[in-house]
Image: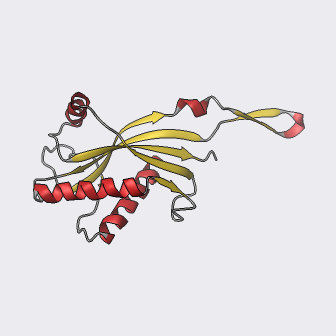
Amino acid sequence: MIQKTLEFLVSEINKHLEAAGRSVKVELAPVIKENSQSFSLNLRLSLINIDEEIASKLQMKIVPVKDNKNSPVHPDLNLALFVLISVDAAEKSYNESLGYISDIINFFRDKNVFTAENTPDMDASIKKLTVEFYNLDFETQKHVWEMLGAKYLPSAVYRVRALFIHE
C-alpha cells in the first residue's frame, strides 16, 4: 500500500511536469545510490519516515458475525508518510532545479487532496490522500540530510496523510 501510494504520487507529479513542458521526470528512489556518494538522478521522491495516526486506532469497530456473536474489526489504517522531493543541481543549472521544486510546490498547493472522485485512476485500496507541506527548522533539516548521508539539495518535505481501506 505504501509503494502504491508513492508510485501514484510520482505519476501525478510527472503528469503535471509534462503538462508544464518539463523534460525531467520524478523517480521514486532513495536520495543517493547505495555504495555511492554521487547523485545519479535529477529529481527524486524519497520516503524518509512513516507514522501511524493513532487517533483512528482507538476506534475499533464491533460487527456481528455468526451465532449472535460479535467480532472486533480493525478500522481503516491512517498513516502519515513523510516524503522528500529533491533535485540534483549538479546535472542541471541551479536555477532550473529551483524551477522544478517550484512546479511541484505549486502542484500540491493546487491539488492537495486526492480521492476516487477527483482522481479516478487512484488505487481502490486508498480511500484518501492529503498532501501537506512540512516545514523543517534548520537543525532538523541538517539531521535529515545527515541521516540520508547526503549533502543538502534543493528540496521540499511533504506529509502525506493516507487513509487505506481495511480489507
Q: In the image, residue 25 lies at what x, y percent? A: 27, 63
Residue drawn at the location 53% of the way across and 58% of the way down: 123
Q: Would residue 88 be seen by someone viewing this image from the given angle?
A: yes
Q: In the image, residue 96 lies at what x, y percent? A: 15, 60
Please count the marks in the image: 0
User: Is residue 120 toward the left or the right of residue 65 in the image?
Assistant: left
Residue drawn at the location 85% of the way across and 33% of the way down: 69
Instruction: Specify the color scheme.
Output: secondary structure
Residue at the limit of the structure toward the right, as seen here: 67
Q: Is residue 136 above or below residue 34?
A: above
Q: In the image, residue 61 lies at what x, y percent? A: 71, 35
Q: Is residue 39 above or below residue 73?
A: below
Residue 152 quadrant: top left
User: Is residue 101 toward the left or the right of residue 53 in the image?
Assistant: left
Residue 60 quadrant: top right
Q: Compare residues 159 and 76 and report the one nearer the observer.
A: 159
Q: Is residue 91 above or below residue 140?
A: below
User: Is residue 99 toward the left or the right of residue 66 in the image?
Assistant: left
Residue drawn at the location 17% of the way across and 54% of the way down: 40
Q: Would residue 42 be seen by someone viewing this image from the given angle?
A: no
Q: In the image, residue 87 lies at what x, y percent? A: 20, 52
Residue 136 quadrant: top left
